[in-house]
């Protein structure tokens, strides 16, 4: 029978501590007792955004283009169907409880 008995001998570890860079009897590194430095480092600050008349004009053009594209007849708006979502969830729940052939 499988699982009965004490097994065959002792399990041997095949892990080589030299692979980590520690030799036999070498001192291990000190324990860390403080949190890591904040991320990201505060040495490098982000570049400030460009401001001015040109940038304001480009922003207005982009917003106008988006609004125009949404008003076109080719724009496909996704309507959220709450009832269909509930039916789909209910079907998935029932199919996970009862095996459907």
Image: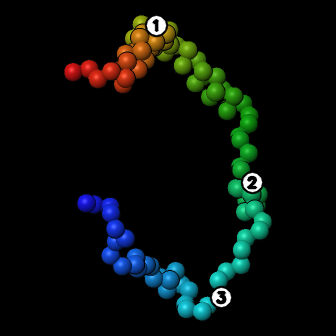
As measured in the structure, the alpha-carbon distance from the residue carrying label 1 to the one carrying label 2 is 48 Å
Depth order, front residue of 9/61: 9
Q: Along the horizontal axis of the image, is 65 left or right of 57?
A: left
The image shows residue 42, relative to residue 87, as above or below, that is below
Tell me if label 2 and label 3 are in contact, CB under 8 Å: no
As measured in the structure, the alpha-carbon distance from the residue carrying label 3 to the one carrying label 1 is 65 Å
Screen quadrant of the N terminus: bottom left
Tell me if label 1 and label 2 are in contact, CB under 8 Å: no
Question: Which mark lies nearer to you, 1 or 2?
Answer: 1
Q: Which residue is mark 3?
A: 27
The image shows residue 81, relative to residue 33, as above or below, that is above
Residue 85 in percent (x, y) is at 45, 14
As measured in the structure, the alpha-carbon distance from the residue carrying label 2 to the one carrying label 3 is 39 Å
Would you call the spot at circle 2 few (<14 residues within 10 Å), some (14-19), or many (20 or more)?
Answer: few
Of callouts 3 and 1, the N-terminal one:
3
Q: Which residue is mark 2?
A: 45
């Amino acid at each position: 029978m499988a699982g009965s008995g004490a097994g065959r001998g002792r399990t041997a570890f095949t892990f080589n501590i030299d692979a980590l860079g520690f030799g036999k009897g070498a001192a291990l590194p000190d324990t860390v007792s403080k949190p890591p430095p904040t991320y990201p480092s505060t040495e490098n600050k982000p570049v400030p955004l460009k401001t001015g008349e040109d940038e304001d004009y480009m922003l207005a053009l982009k917003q106008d283009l988006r609004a125009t594209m949404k008003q076109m007849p080719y724009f496909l708006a996704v309507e959220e169907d709450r009832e269909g979502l509930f039916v789909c969830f209910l079907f998935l729940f029932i199919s996970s409880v009862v095996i459907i052939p």
